[in-house]
Structure formats: C-alpha cells, structure tokens
Amino acid sequence: MNFPTPFGRRAVVIGAGSFGTAVAVLLARGGLRTTLQTRTPEQAERLAEDRENSVYLAGVEFPKELRIEHMGAGLARADYVFLGVPSRGLHEVIDGLAAAGLPPRAKLVSLAKGLVPPDGVAPTVMLRRSFGAARVGCIGGPAHAREMVHEGAGLVAASEDEELAHALAQVFIRAGVVCEESSDPVGVELAGAAKNAAALAAGATERQGLNAAGAAAGHIFAEVWRFAAIQDPPAQAESMIGLAGTGDLVATALAPQSRNRRAGELLGEGVPTAEIPARIGQAVEALESVPLLAGALERAGVEAPVTRGLAALIAGELPLDGWISLVRTAVPPPARFRRPADVVAGLGWWARLKVRWRTWRERRAELPPA
C-alpha cells in the first residue's frame, strides 16, 4: 500500500534525556523538521548554545536543522509528538497536551519502556484512551542512545495504524537505522518492560553465576509472556522473541553502561533501592515498573513468582538470599504436550476422516493373517 511521505513534516520530542535527545537527532537526520523540547528554559538555552546535550549525551553534535525549545513553546504546528519522558510522568504530560495546543490530527509516539502507574498499563494503552488507536504508536528494540546515533540500532515502530507505523519506520531508515514495522504496540511495550525487569533480575543474581542470572531473566520473560498472551488483542509472539524483546535484552545484558543491569548489580550488593538512581545518575525505569508489572500480573491471575519476588526485593521485603533461593527453586507451570487426539481435533472434518482411515489401515496391516 502506498502512503504519503512523512518527510518534511514537523516533529516535537518532549524530554531531553539521553534517549529523547538521540531520537531527536535521528528524526532531524531522517527528514523531519524536528524540535527538542526541554523541561526548563535554562536547559533549552544551554543545549541551544552548546549544540549538544553535555549532561546526557555528551559528544553528540546536534544537526543544524534541530531546533531547541522549552516545553512552554507549545505544540501548535506538530504533526508528530514523541514522548521522551519516563512512564511515571506520562499522566502529567498527557494532561498538558491540550493546553500546549496539540493539533487534532497530530500523532503521539511513546518512547518509554516502562509501565504507567498506578495500574501498570502500557503507555500506548493510556494514550489510546485519550486519543484513539489510530493516533498512537511506540518505539522499541535495542537502542542504546549513544550507539544509535553513531552506529545505528534495531528499532521497532509499532502502531495499530499501518500508515503511522510505516511513516515512523521510513524516517528512521532514512536516518540510517534499521527499523521494523509492527501492528502490536502493547506487545512491543510489554516486551520492553520484560526486558527491563529481566535485566534488573539478571544483574541482581549475577554474583551467583551466569546460570542463575540467565534463569532469573528467563523466568521473568516467561511470566510476562503469559500476561501478554491474554491481552485484548493478544500480543504477538514476534514482539517478545524479536527485536523488541530478546534482541533488546541481549543488548542490555552485554552493555556495561545499562542502567537497569547496573541497578540490579547494586541491588545484589545490598544497596538500598532509594540510593540507586543517585548512584547511577539517571532514573532507572525498572525499579518503578517491576512493582507495577507484578501487580498487573497478579490482578490478571498470571502465576509470576519471580516477578513478584523481584518486586519484593526492590521494596526491601525480601532479603537477597531469599531472592536467590526463589530463582533457583522456581518451577514454571507444567508443560503441555500435544497428543495425537489433540492434533486430530485441530483438523477439519475431511482431514480427520483421512487420519482415521489411515490409522485403521495401519492397524489392519499389523493384524496377523486369518
């Protein structure tokens, strides 16, 4: 299907953290007239003067086309609005969009990889409630901010609206980044939340060996997948096993600078949760999203002992040795094996008849001659 080209349209990125800044750089390279909006006028003035984000993305020069503004400048001419704020701040940002002059046809794209309090819903679910599914999308996949602007990344642009997913992918591809299209935004976001939780769990368990760390991450992923599979509509398996899930997890596990992995290591060293963000120098989304994720799984009736245990470890309610014991002894739900009768039951009536006819002939051939 042919869609209108997005190039030349206006994009605003709200939030000048490391990932928001990197996305703004790529959007400008990809042909959108891009503005990066900061929380304070002082931050906007500093970024505009330095032409780089020396706090969160030092050494990455801004394209000359990239504009810098304070959030108070508004959104009146935006075609795309990228929300580069932590998921805990999404309520506040959504409440301010109308006052900022959000155009009625502007598309909203979440960059968060956490869940929104208090109910632990995916960001696009909250956006969809206010703006409708056709205006909402998200970005997932392995995308460390500094590396993505220099070496590229493996992104996933997801939306229930095919035109929006295609437009986002085309812009990132033009900027030199691999970007897949997906029709499963909630699955992509849950995959990102699972990745963050799994990286945190692996980091907290790494001192007990790589096998234990891998088991912790694997249990988390399996538990979140059981939750994703019962969403309406159900998440697609490709979202969890593809770039947005396992691809992002591997990148995080291999990255020494990963905030979620480092936060897990600090938990494993006995550092109180409240002290970890200050030690790392940035917010750690998994520390906030794991308790929300555990609550969402419990309300959905999903058996998730490891996710629940990780939330208890974060809250200081489970000692480290209790966490390690839980990871080593956790038993997932029993496997379901397909039996011949199940296979036959899943076939059409003609196919079932042929199977039964073939089975009858085989059994007849095994009988001794009369």
Image: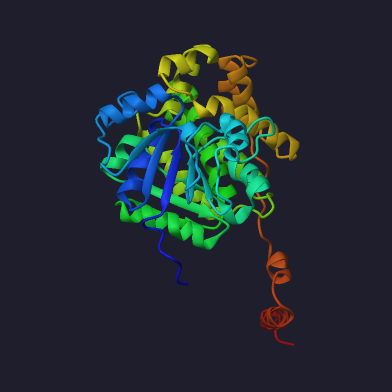
Residue 25 in percent (x, y) is at 33, 41
User: From the viewer's perspective, is 201 left or right of 232?
Assistant: left
Q: In which quarter of the view is residue 304 placed?
A: top right
Q: Quadrant of the C terminus?
A: bottom right
Q: Nearer the viewer, residue 132 or 115?
A: 132
Q: Name the residue: 39% across, 22% down.
A: 42
Q: In which quarter of the view is residue 310 placed?
A: top right
Q: Name the residue: 41% across, 31% down.
A: 16
Q: Nearer the viewer, residue 352 or 316?
A: 316
User: From the viewer's perspective, is 239 left or right of 117?
Assistant: left
Q: Name the residue: 64% across, 42% down.
A: 126
Q: In which quarter of the view is residue 274 placed?
A: top right
Residue 182 in percent (x, y) is at 50, 57
Residue 23 in percent (x, y) is at 38, 42
Q: Is residue 189 visible?
A: yes
Residue 240 in percent (x, y) is at 53, 48
